Image (cartoon, grey):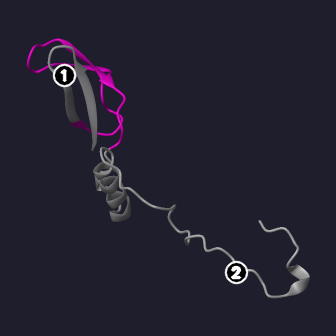
Amino acid sequence: MATYEFTCRADGVLARTMPLGEAPPAIDCPECGNPAPRRWSVPQLRFGDSRARRLITATEATAAEPAVVSAPPGRAPHRPRRPTADPRTARLPRP
């Protein structure tokens, strides 16, 4: 069974569960009786594996207020190199 969405101009979005591939191009709205054409919608991802659900939940939670970070993830903070004590390299340019 798949969930199909239809849009009524007066009553908004209507969701109906029907066998896969058997949804008509339009249905009559149960409230007003006007035709409600089928619309394209995103598949229901909430029934996916747990990693996908956690990722979606974390993304939704940070959509309005993203977390503030001090550095890109997975990178160690930059540490300046100590100059070597070797006199042969003392005059070389430093990066």
Residue at the disc numbered 2: 82
Q: Is residue 54 above or below residue 36?
A: below
Element class at badge 2? loop
| Vertical relation: 76 (above or below) 18 | below
Determine the CA span between mark 1 and mark 2.
66 Å
User: Over which residues does the magenta segment extend?
Assistant: 17-43
Hey, what amino acid is under mark 2? Arg
Picture coordinates of residue 24 (x, y %)? Answer: 30, 24
The answer to which image quadrant residue 51 occupies is bottom left
Camera sees residue 16: yes
Q: Label 1 is placed on what type of residue?
A: Gly
Can residue 48 be seen from the camera position used here?
no
Q: Position of residue 81 (x, y in %)?
A: 69, 77
Seen from the viewer's position, the closer of residues 25 and 86 is: 86
Residue under label 1: 12
As drawn, which residue projects farthest toward the right? 88
Q: Residue furthest bottom?
A: 85
